[in-house]
Amino acid sequence: MPTVLEDKIHVSTPTRAWRLDLLAQRAALVAILIAVWWGFSLTLPHYVLPLYPAIAILIAGILNSGNLSKARWLVRGTIGWFLFPGAIAIAVLVAFIMFGGDLGLIAWPFSAAAVIFGLFAWWLYDADGAERALLRGMIASVLVAVTVYAVTLRLLPSLFPSENLLTRFGAAAATASKYRVMSAT
């Protein structure tokens, strides 16, 4: 006679009702995903943070069941994991030169690593399988984000010109406002 613990650990083949229950759970996660995204996507960016657990559960369920699509167009579309980081690396270099005035050497290692991971994700898709290719593609996307942030952080002062205006026109504006106050009294 099995104990309660052994009975809980025992893995049996899933029944039809259990599979339908799993389908209902996935449908609920997708409904949460769509509702929260639709409701909060136009507001502040951090409002969509409750979506991350639902997205993670859905991705883990797809990866665990081995149901990643093997459609021909999707397999051929993995070249985007290589082309997208390459295009972003070129765009970042152009943005650094146009807006920053230098070559932006800080972003080069990250963009090169993103291109390499994207190349390996595309190139080794058939050899290693969809799961590892997806992992490499996600690593490439994180490295692309770091590359873009390297540009964005350096260019933030140009997006907020108030300090530049204060340094250029600060003394003249202070003098003018002093005279306006004196003439008003």
Image (cartoon, rainbow, N blue to C red):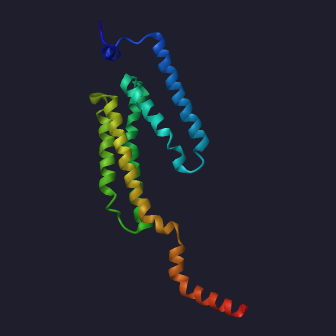
Image location (x, y in percent) of residue 21: 49, 18
Q: Residue furthest right?
A: 184
Identity of the residue drawn at 44% across and 60% down: 152
For the N terminus, the quadrant is top left
Relative vertical location of residue 105 with respect to residue 57 in this rendering, above or below: below
For the C terminus, the quadrant is bottom right
Identity of the residue drawn at 68% across and 93% down: 182
Identity of the residue drawn at 52% across and 68% down: 160
In-front residue for pair 35/129: 35
Image location (x, y in percent) of residue 77: 41, 34
Is residue 96 something one can see in this rendering? yes
Image location (x, y in percent) of residue 123: 30, 35
How many marks are shown on the rendered structure? 0
Q: Residue furthest top?
A: 1
Identity of the residue drawn at 59% across and 35% down: 35
In-front residue for pair 112/58: 58
Is residue 98 something one can see in this rendering? no
Indicate the quadrant where residue 104 lies: bottom left
Relative vertical location of residue 118 with respect to residue 89 in this rendering, above or below: above
Indicate the quadrant where residue 3 lies: top left
Image location (x, y in percent) of residue 134: 36, 35
Q: Is residue 175 left or right of residue 88?
A: right
In-front residue for pair 33/70: 33
Q: Residue furthest left?
A: 127
Q: Is residue 99 left or right of residue 122?
A: right
